[in-house]
């Protein structure tokens, strides 16, 4: 029987503790039924939201790692990028996309840079500025509100009106011609994700009642589900609905079990809710 299982290359860091990036993408994409192939950008003892961390930047080793993949002729249905460890990685990841993107490969760029109005500890202004270059390569770009502000040089506010958000989308669509999803938009007691379609130039807002203050790693849970579903052929708005519902469920579970905020969301007992995807099963046949 021919192997039709879809494969996603995930360019992201490996953080030992704190549930983010690859420790989230690997189980989530696998649970949905796709193969997840990591390209590590850095190895960290734990994510940068803890009072201290050890980080080993992988920039120098990435070209050799990737050239083996090229030599062996590996191919991917999706490429998902996340946390980058250095400015030079922008060029490496761009070249990776040029080398591995085929006609049917979907490129999902999560421009990981910060949250709650602030850039993460390792994200210099120069690295943030170069992220705009990478954003141009996305078929689907998934910034949170902070990252959308950084990419468009918009001063951050915790709440924006929909009219202001449309201006941000207009600026983002000048950087990236793909679909754009802005996550984590506060609208009163709701949390919205807005999906912009460049073809119809229209935006769909997906609102859910906010359950709790955000936690680290939720963006990685979200982008992993969106990437896996879109690569599998689910329409983007439905993928975003599913990702938002799952993140919300994980947040409730984490609160119920008093998981410390730095440890991200307790998604493991809920993974089974992601498997059994009919579309994946059908496509394997
Ligand atoms: O979840 C985003 C993320 C990814 N990788 C590392 C991080 C963070 C957020 O803090 O520190 C290393």
Image (cartoon, rainbow, N blue to C red):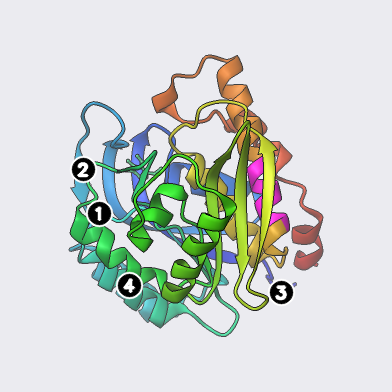
Q: Residue at x 57, y 15 (%)?
A: 257
Q: Mark 4 near ligand 1 (CB under 8 Å)?
A: no
Using the image, determine if residue 253 lies above or below residue 214: above
Image-quarter location of ligand 1: top left
Using the image, determine if residue 216 lies above or below residue 262: below
Helix, strand or loop under label 4: helix
Distance Cα–Cα, label 3 vs label 2? 41 Å
Around disc 3, counting alpha carbons within 10 Å, would you say few (fewer than 14), some (14 to 19), or many (20 or more)? few
The front one of 170 and 32 is 170
Q: Quadrant of the C terminus?
A: bottom right
Magenta stretch in the rendered image: 238-245
Distance Cα–Cα, label 3 vs label 4? 38 Å
Distance Cα–Cα, label 3 vs label 1? 38 Å
Please tell me the numbered disc located at residue 133.
Answer: 4
Q: Nearer the viewer, mark 3 or mark 4?
A: 4
Q: Quadrant of the N terminus?
A: bottom right
Residue 212, position as x, y percentages in the image: 56, 25
Of the two numbered discs 3 and 2 on the same chain, state the one appearing first in sequence.
3
Locate residue 79 relative to residue 7 in the image: left or right: left
Tag 1 and tag 2, C-beta contact below 8 Å: yes
- Residue 23 visible in rendering: yes
Q: Mark 2 near ligand 1 (CB under 8 Å)?
A: yes
Helix, strand or loop under label 2: strand
Of the two numbered discs 3 and 1 on the same chain, state the one appearing first in sequence.
3
Which residue, given by chain and number where applicable, does mark 1 sit on? Answer: 85
Residue 208, quarter of the rendered image: top right
Distance Cα–Cα, label 4 vs label 2? 24 Å
Residue 5, quarter of the rendered image: bottom right
Q: Nearer the viewer, mark 3 or mark 2?
A: 2
Distance Cα–Cα, label 1 vs label 2? 9 Å
């Amino acid at each position: 029987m021919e192997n039709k299982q879809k494969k996603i290359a995930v360019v992201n860091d490996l953080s030992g503790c704190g549930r983010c990036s690859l420790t989230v993408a690997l189980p989530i994409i696998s649970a949905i039924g796709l193969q997840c192939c990591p390209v590590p950008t850095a190895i960290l003892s734990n994510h940068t939201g803890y009072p201290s961390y050890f980080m080993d930047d992988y920039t120098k080793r990435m070209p050799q790692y990737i050239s083996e993949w090229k030599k062996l002729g590996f191919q991917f249905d999706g490429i998902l990028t996340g946390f980058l460890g250095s400015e030079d990685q922008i060029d490496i990841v761009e070249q990776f996309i040029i080398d591995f993107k085929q006609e049917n490969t979907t490129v999902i760029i999560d421009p990981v840079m910060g949250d709650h109005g602030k850039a993460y500890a390792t994200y210099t202004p120069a690295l943030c500025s170069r992220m705009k270059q990478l954003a141009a390569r996305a078929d689907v770009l998934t910034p949170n509100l902070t990252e959308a502000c950084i990419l468009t040089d918009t001063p951050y506010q915790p709440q924006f009106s929909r009219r202001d958000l449309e201006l941000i989308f207009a600026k983002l669509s000048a950087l990236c011609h793909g679909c754009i999803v802005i996550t984590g938009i506060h609208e009163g007691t709701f949390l919205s994700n807005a999906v912009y379609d460049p073809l119809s130039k229209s935006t769909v807002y997906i609102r859910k009642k906010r359950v709790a203050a955000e936690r680290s790693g939720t963006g990685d849970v979200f982008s992993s589900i969106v990437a896996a579903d879109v690569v599998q052929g689910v329409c983007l708005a439905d993928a975003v609905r599913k990702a938002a519902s799952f993140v919300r469920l994980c947040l409730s579970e984490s609160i119920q079990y008093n998981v410390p905020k730095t440890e991200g969301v307790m998604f493991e007992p809920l993974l089974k809710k992601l498997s059994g995807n009919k579309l994946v099963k059908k496509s394997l046949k």
